[in-house]
């Protein structure tokens, strides 16, 4: 069987091996990056196709007559048209829970960025500390987490893991989800209540039909002026114009965003110049361990498909 990876560099920039996939097929061609207009030419003879962020629309898929299997090299699968693939009997899998630790670590790094102000407090060390009267000084206050509330939007693998880390730090945890569970020490509340009560808000839910732009001016206006918003899920969950206005108007204290609605962003994205807005280039998921896990699970997904089994099937 012939297999093609459309955007291999996003997962493996050369520091990992594709051997666990290669050994299962006759040929595996891995392209670092594929433009939309190149997909059909590169994939037309493929029976097995892997994508990370390259979109597979019905207009493209209908021109891939040999296709039997699509492996999404990510947890989110909005880049493929499930309705079309199901109608054609083409199997689709994703890779859940491969980078939970990596994303939680990134969420906490963002929280510590705001509470400990390491960058700001280190700026004047060489010039100011030698001349200081006291043994210490700070350019910005250091905040304690033990009396703070974190609101977690979404309670999947990442949301649950994040809640346990925050509880260990003495934080109060409130969660907004469509699927509340009986979880000790965690309070399940409405989305509006979560935005009003929380000192930190972490968005950890999937982008789905109906929730695009859910974090808008109305929700942001409910936040404390001292509160921070963190998004490691999908950029389109936030109305970026409304968030930029909230930051610039001091409606909220700050935001840390690992995802934007368009990636790479346009230079005029309002969040790139917004006040106290930390933007990172979609790297929360990308620790080496997480990427190794991703390839391992993707390999097992393919192995299951070839055996007629259904590991992580979306159809």
Image (tube, grey):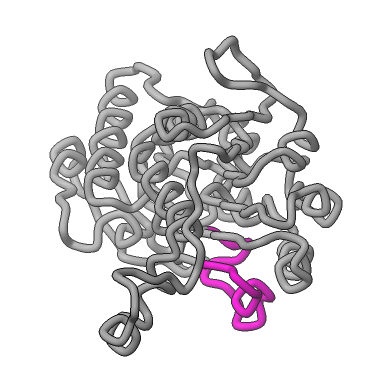
Tell me which residue sits at (46%, 29%) in the image: 167
- Hey, which quadrant is residue 20 in on the image? top left
Tell me which residue sits at (40%, 29%) in the image: 168
- Dominant secondary structure of the residues highlighted in magenta in the image: loop
Q: Farthest residue toward the front? A: 133
In this orientation, does residue 93 appear? no
Q: Position of residue 146 (x, y in %)?
A: 49, 37
Q: Farthest residue toward the right? A: 218
- In which quadrant of the rendered image does the N terminus lie? top left
- In which quadrant of the rendered image does the C terminus lie? top right
Of 87 and 211, which appears nearest the observer? Answer: 211
**Image side of residue 29 versus residue 91, left or right:** left
Of 230 and 60, which appears nearest the observer? Answer: 230
In this orientation, does residue 66 appear? yes
Range of residues picked out in magenta = 259-278
Tell me which residue sits at (62%, 48%) in the image: 58
Rendered position, 24 above or below 202: above
Q: Position of residue 246 (x, y in %)?
A: 76, 65
Inspect the magenta stretch and tell me whether residue 144 lies in it.
no
């Amino acid at each position: 069987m012939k297999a093609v990876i459309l955007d291999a560099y996003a997962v493996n920039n050369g520091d990992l091996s594709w051997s666990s996939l290669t050994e299962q097929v006759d040929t595996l061609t891995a392209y670092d990056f594929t433009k939309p207009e190149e997909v059909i030419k590169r994939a037309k003879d493929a029976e097995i196709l892997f994508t990370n962020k390259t979109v597979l629309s019905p207009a493209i898929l209908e021109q891939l007559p040999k296709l039997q299997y699509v492996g999404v090299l990510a947890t989110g699968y909005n880049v493929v048209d499930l309705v079309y693939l199901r109608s054609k009997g083409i199997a689709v899998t994703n890779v859940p829970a491969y980078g939970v630790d990596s994303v939680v670590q990134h969420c906490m790094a963002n929280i510590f960025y705001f509470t400990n102000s390491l960058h700001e407090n280190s700026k004047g060390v060489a010039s100011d500390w030698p001349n200081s009267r006291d043994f210490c000084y700070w350019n910005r206050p250091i905040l304690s987490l033990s009396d703070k509330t974190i609101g977690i939007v979404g309670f999947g693998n990442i949301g649950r893991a994040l809640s346990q880390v925050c509880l260990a730090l003495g934080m109060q945890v409130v969660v907004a989800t469509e699927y509340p569970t009986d979880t000790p020490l965690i309070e399940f509340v409405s989305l509006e209540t979560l935005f009003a009560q929380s000192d930190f808000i972490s968005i950890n839910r999937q982008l789905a039909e109906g929730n695009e732009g859910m974090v808008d001016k109305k929700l942001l206006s409910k936040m404390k002026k001292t509160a921070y918003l963190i998004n490691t899920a999908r950029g389109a969950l936030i109305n970026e114009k409304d968030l930029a206005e909230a930051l610039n108007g001091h409606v909220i204290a700050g935001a840390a965003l690992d995802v934007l609605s368009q990636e790479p962003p346009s230079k005029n994205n309002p969040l790139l110049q917004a006040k106290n807005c930390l933007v990172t280039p979609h790297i929360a998921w990308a620790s080496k361990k997480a990427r190794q896990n991703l390839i391992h699970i993707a390999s097992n997904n393919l192995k299951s498909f070839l055996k007629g089994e259904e590991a992580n099937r979306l159809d």
